[in-house]
Image: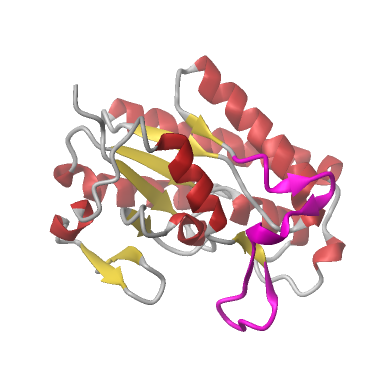
Amino acid sequence: MSKQTLIIFGDSHTRSFSNKNIKNVIFSGTGKNLNFLNYKNTLIIFYRIIRLKQYLSEEIIFLVFGEPDLRFLSYSDFEVENIKKAKSLLSIERNIKKSINRYIFLMKLLQLFNIKFAVVGVHSPNIFLLDSVKYWNRKLREFCLTKNIVYYENQTYVLGSKILKEFIGNSIHNDKIPDHVHLSNKLGEYFYESYKDKYTFELHFLDKVTILKYDDKFKVYRFKM
């Protein structure tokens, strides 16, 4: 039996997965628009996945979402100047559950439309979000386990309360300062090692998807419109 081709699909955190071995990466939009803070944004994600359906047969889509929800709920904004001012998990737990429920709603829609998918947990270099990240990932992992959905999470990038240096990249807006939102491409290297024997990483599969264009700067695909 031939192996499935793996596609990474999600918000700006998809860039952390792009490397010489992983080319099928779709940056489908910013976390400001693609999140589970409301059902409108959830359906936007669904619509963009559905646009790909005609090009898919046995491919599996690994969904990369969730960090923008935690960032917004923790800071009441997507743009964060002082990462130390994150709200406690206890104060936002109820709203995190609401976002997770909308994510589960998306998964059920994808199953209804026979779209093969897997789920990637949230990864963040912001140590002040770690409690919320761990909570989100635990809930997501538990749901995926009960529904036999493939789930991926790298837990090696955190050592105690510190982020390992190799996982910290520089901001795309200023390469002289660390990125406190996205992990480095080291995450993608670990991901590839985890799945290189289970899936195929057909390097040019997305070239034939006419609704996408390649972004050479960030090494990802984007929707043309």
Look at the image and tell me in which quarter the C terminus lies: bottom left
Name the residue at 39% across, 77% down: 217
- Report the number of discs: 0
Q: Is residue 172 above or below residue 90?
A: below
146 or 69, nearer to the observer: 146
The quarter of the rendered structure image containing the N terminus is: top left
The percent position of residue 138, horizontal first and vertical second, equals 67, 30
Quadrant of the image occupied by residue 209: bottom left
Q: Residue at x 68, y 48 (%)?
A: 157
Residues rendered magenta in the picture: 154-179
Q: Is residue 44 above or below residue 81?
A: above
Q: Nearer the viewer, residue 199 or 145?
A: 199
Q: Quadrant of residue 220?
A: bottom left
| Residue 7 position within the rendered picture, expressed as x and y whole percent measured from the top left | 33, 46
The reply to whether residue 176 is in sight is: yes
User: Residue 196's spot in the image, x, y percent?
Assistant: 38, 38
